[in-house]
Image (cartoon, grey):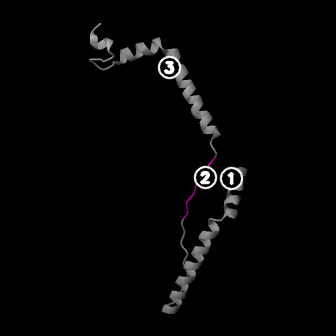
Amino acid sequence: MSDDDRDGERSRPLELREFLRILRVYWAGATIVVLVATSAAALWSMTQPRVYESAASGVVQAVSGSDAGLALAADNLAKSKAQTYVRLAGSEAVADDVSAALAGA
């Protein structure tokens, strides 16, 4: 055995045959490590609270005639309705309804 091997340094990369030989020798320990890690990940995942997130977009458009005054009024009405819809959609009541619907599904 050379000095390089005793120091833990290798002069060449680990080949597949060597890796399989090591795995055959330590198969029980490798299996235990994989099972413990998988079990810990599953347990952690099950204990985390469910978090739901969504995104939506929409267009509010008011129909207007050819009159510039009516077009401006319709645009202001559409903007006002859009702000109302955003507040309504983001309200706690809507979130509670969605949560109840998802729990029942």
Q: CA distance from mark 2 to mark 3?
A: 36 Å
Q: Which residue is mark 3?
A: 30
Q: Amino acid at mark 3?
A: Ala
Over which residues does the magenta segment extend? 50-56
Q: Nearer the viewer, mark 3 or mark 1?
A: 3
Q: Report the disc number at residue 52.
A: 2
Three-letter amino acid code at the position of disc 1? Leu
Mark 2 lies on a secondary structure that is loop
Relative to 93, say whether 12 is above or below. Answer: above
Residue 105 visible: no
Numbered tag placed on residue 14 in the rendering: none
Dot 2 alpha-carbon crowd within 10 angstroms: few under 14, some 14 to 19, many 20 or more: few
Tell me which residue sits at (52%, 17%) in the image.
Answer: 29
Answer few, some or many: residues within 10 Å of disc 3's Cα (few below 14, many 20 plus, some between 14 and 19). Answer: few
The part of the image, by quadrant, that contains residue 39 is: top right
Residue beneath label 1, please? 102
Judge by depth and name the residue closer to the eye, 42 or 3. Answer: 3
